[in-house]
């Protein structure tokens, strides 16, 4: 994982632009665990950590998201 002093939160449009994925493919990959999970920013707003997206971009074919704890 890349270490950044400030790990920015990227919104959906920025993630789609960076990755070249469609919205439906992005969510399908998240569900399959092959793309980083989103982070809840506010009630109706989510984003992705820039470091996690960068890690995925470094090797998208073998990326596996860390399991998220059940709530």
Image (cartoon, grey):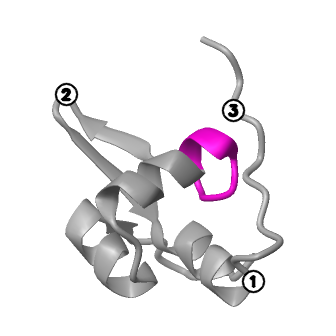
Badge 1: how crowded within 10 Å, few (<14), some, or many (20+)?
Answer: few
Q: Is residue 34 magenta?
A: yes
In-image side of 41 versus 37 (left or right): left
Label located before the other in sequence (1 or 2): 2
In-image side of 27 versus 52 (left or right): left
Residue 36 picture location, percent across and down: 59, 56
Label located before the other in sequence (2 or 3): 2
Residue at which label 3 appears: 68
Secondary structure under the numbered disc 2 in the rendered image? loop
Secondary structure under the numbered disc 3 in the rendered image? loop
> In the rendered image of this protein, does residue 12 appear above or below residue 59?
above
Residue 30 picture location, percent across and down: 56, 48
Tell me the magenta residue range.
30-37
Contact, mark 2 vs mark 3 (Cβ under 8 Å) = no
Which quadrant holds residue 62?
bottom right
Residue at image point 77% right, 67% down: 63
Q: Can you say which quadrant of the picture contains the C terminus?
A: top right
In the depicted view, which residue is nearer to us: 19 or 45?
19
Which quadrant holds residue 26?
bottom left
In the depicted view, which residue is nearer to us: 47 or 25?
25
Secondary structure under the numbered disc 1 in the rendered image? loop
Which quadrant holds residue 39?
top left
Residue at image point 44% right, 48% down: 27
Residue at which label 1 appears: 59
Residue at which label 2 appears: 43
Q: How far apart are the alpha carbons under marks 1 and 3?
A: 20 Å
Residue at image point 73% right, 52% down: 65
In-image side of 32 versus 30 (left or right): right
In the depicted view, which residue is nearer to us: 30 or 55?
30
Label located before the other in sequence (1 or 3): 1
């Amino acid at each position: 994982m890349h270490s950044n002093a400030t790990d920015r939160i990227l919104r959906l449009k920025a993630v789609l632009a960076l990755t070249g994925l469609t919205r439906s493919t992005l969510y399908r990959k998240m569900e399959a665990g092959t793309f980083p999970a989103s982070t809840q920013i506010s009630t109706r707003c989510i984003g992705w950590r820039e470091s996690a997206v960068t890690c995925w971009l470094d090797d998208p074919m073998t990326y596996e998201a860390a399991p998220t704890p059940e709530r």
